[in-house]
């Protein structure tokens, strides 16, 4: 477990931000760090790591003051590994030499080889970084950061500029890494979908302060957060009780409810997320429809969602909670009220893994 | 003439060989934000670039005399005299050529995105390891340039040598001083030959250097 507390001022070239973080515990393997561009995410991380020096105040990691307790205020001795947005692969070293760079003489070459084969990088080992695509460079940099013998790993926008297939592989490795090696990962992104897929809990940074910190599922159901930060609310379906494969897709069972989803990697592992605009509501069961997922639910709340002049309807079954974003007109047409029993419908393909 | 040329090359070679590690060590220390003390040292080490060589030679003559600061220092390790000796010339050349090696080396190291160095530090490597394993290989062309400039500049040295070395054949009679003597004694034929050799040698070094620079930058964009 890791805890972080910070209170300092950081001066940019012609402005400054006050960072004020009350003590936060990171209890789960992967903590998402969310905030809009310019919210101070990267600056905070760079100060924690030591690349940026703070002008006044303190940053405490596990109750150690990083600035005054640790003599070498720079990087390296703080026990934090970091994957920056720029990969910074060393251009004069081959892919393999880059990957094993953090290892000492008795390094864990096995672990390196395991990661290399998981990401199918074996054929690239003798190449130089400038011979790789942007996505390949990022994968190599990730492996290098994972191999560094530090307890905490900070990833700043690890999926930027990465195609979908590579992103799935990268997320899988990060998950495996954090779970099996007892390491804490801070996964920074401005993309809530990326975070919803992988993180156990999410920290929201706004203007240098920790605005929210909650489990991913609860945060996404927090309408105050959705209204302030998201263009459309999303819901998470996780921990199915059973998964079966049927060729063109998978069936996920949440106790008695069966959800049909497209082919996804590791349905047991991944958080499945669904946009609130993809969930529709019907007063009665719909027969003869192409929509594969249809369940009885109860309306537990109706909230104004100002961005699209629409209403956010919270739907609850015994197994999960879904959010449906519908227009005010539709709401009036259905005459929905809290407590009403309705049917919710969504296509298999609207589930994103 | 051959002896003077050989002595010149020997002096330039030894000077460069000593200057490269000195300047690399200085760069390790100078790397990063330029604090006032670093600025002062950098200014001081750039002085030989702007001072008349005779000023430098004058002070070196005083410092290296047996009672001078450097003279008495080396006296402790058994070197009795530096003035009018080859050893003295080496020390003088090192001081005289420092800015020509340090400046391009420092500039090329500072031009590298500091993120590479920081990444190495984040990955757990020491400052010195990061400097030599990341920055130095990435700046290898700049370092080669500084070595060539230091070498050629030592070949072209005249004023300082005249002040502290004199013109002792085989000991301090390097090509530039020998040439001065040839002209003084109106031996224009040999002076022409020696000048031509010096021009061609320096030209060849610079040509190779610029050819390498084309190769290096070509590789980067390929």
Image (cartoon, coloured by chain):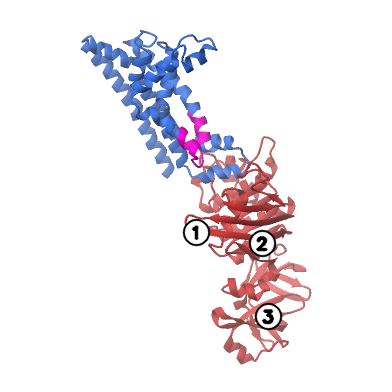
- Toward which corner of the image does residue A32 lie, by quadrant? bottom right
Residue B102: in magenta span: no
Between tags 1 and 3, which lies in front?
1
Across and down, in percent, residue A227 comes to 60, 75
**Helix, strand or loop at mark 1:** loop
Between tags 3 and 2, which lies in front?
3
Q: Which residue corresponds to mark 3?
A: A314
User: Neighbour class for label 3 at 10 Å: few (<14), some, many (≥20)?
Assistant: many
Instruction: In the picture, one chain is red; tell me its letter.
Output: A
- Residue A165 visible somewhere in the drawing: no
Q: Looking at the image, which residue is at 64% across and 80% down?
A: A324
Say whether residue A250 is left or right of residue A42. Answer: right
Q: Earlier in the sequence, mark 2 or mark 1?
A: 1
Across and down, in percent, residue B221 comes to 41, 44
Q: Looking at the image, which residue is at 68% across and 74% down?
A: A221
Q: Chain of mark 1?
A: A
Q: Earlier in the sequence, mark 3 or mark 2?
A: 2
Q: Main secondary structure of the magenta part?
A: helix
Instruction: In the picture, one chain is blue; tell me its letter.
Output: B
């Amino acid at each position: 477990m890791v805890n972080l507390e910070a209170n300092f001022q950081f001066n940019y070239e012609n402005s400054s931000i006050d960072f004020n973080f009350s003590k936060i515990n990171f209890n789960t393997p992967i903590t998402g760090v969310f905030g809009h561009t310019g919210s101070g995410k990267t600056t905070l991380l760079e100060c924690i790591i030591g690349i940026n020096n703070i002008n006044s105040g303190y940053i405490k990691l596990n109750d150690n003051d990083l600035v005054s307790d640790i003599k070498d205020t720079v990087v390296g001795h703080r026990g934090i590994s970091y994957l920056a947005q720029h990969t910074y692969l060393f251009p004069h070293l081959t892919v393999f030499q880059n990957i094993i760079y953090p290892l000492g003489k008795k390094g864990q070459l096995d672990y390196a080889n395991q990661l290399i084969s998981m990401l199918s990088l074996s054929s690239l080992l003798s190449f130089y970084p400038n011979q790789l695509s942007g996505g390949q460079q990022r994968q190599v940099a990730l492996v290098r950061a994972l191999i560094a013998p530090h307890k905490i790993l900070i990833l700043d926008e690890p999926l930027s500029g990465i195609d979908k297939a590579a992103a799935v592989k990268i997320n899988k490795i990060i998950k495996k890494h954090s779970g099996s090696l007892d390491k804490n990962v801070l996964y920074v992104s401005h993309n809530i979908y990326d975070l919803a897929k992988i993180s156990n809990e999410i920290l929201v940074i706004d203007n240098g302060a920790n605005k929210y910190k909650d489990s991913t599922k609860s945060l996404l159901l927090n309408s105050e957060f959705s209204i302030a930060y998201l263009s459309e609310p999303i819901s998470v379906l996780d921990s199915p009780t059973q998964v079966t494969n049927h060729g063109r897709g998978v069936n996920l069972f949440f106790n008695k409810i069966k959800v049909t989803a497209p082919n996804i990697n590791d349905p047991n592992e991944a958080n499945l997320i669904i946009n609130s605009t993809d969930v529709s509501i019907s007063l009665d069961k719909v027969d003869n429809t192409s929509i594969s997922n249809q369940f009885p639910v109860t309306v537990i709340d109706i909230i104004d969602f100002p961005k699209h002049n629409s209403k956010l309807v919270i739907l609850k079954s015994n197994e999960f909670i879904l959010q449906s974003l519908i227009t005010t007109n539709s709401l009036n047409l259905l005459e929905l009220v809290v407590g009403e029993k309705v049917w919710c419908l969504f296509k298999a393909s609207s589930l994103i893994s | 003439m051959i002896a003077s040329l050989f002595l010149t090359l020997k002096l330039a070679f030894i000077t460069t060989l000593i200057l490269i590690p000195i300047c690399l060590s200085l760069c390790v220390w100078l790397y990063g934000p330029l604090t006032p003390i670093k600025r002062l040292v950098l200014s001081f080490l750039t002085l030989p670039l702007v001072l008349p060589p005779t000023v430098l030679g004058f002070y070196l003559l005083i410092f290296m005399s047996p009672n001078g600061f450097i003279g008495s220092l080396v006296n402790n390790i058994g070197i009795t005299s530096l003035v009018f000796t080859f050893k003295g010339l080496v020390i003088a050349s090192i001081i005289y050529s420092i800015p020509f090696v340090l400046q391009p080396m420092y500039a090329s190291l500072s031009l590298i995105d500091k993120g590479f160095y920081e990444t190495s530090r984040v990955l757990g490597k020491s400052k010195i390891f990061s400097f030599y394993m990341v920055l130095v290989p990435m700046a290898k062309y700049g370092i080669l340039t500084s070595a060539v400039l230091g070498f050629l500049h030592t070949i072209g040295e005249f004023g300082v040598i005249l002040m502290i070395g004199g013109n002792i054949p085989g000991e301090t009679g390097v090509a530039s001083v020998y040439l001065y003597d040839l002209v003084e004694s109106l031996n224009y034929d040999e002076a022409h030959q020696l000048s031509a050799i010096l021009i061609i040698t320096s030209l060849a070094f610079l040509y190779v250097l610029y050819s390498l620079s084309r190769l290096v930058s070509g590789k980067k964009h390929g």
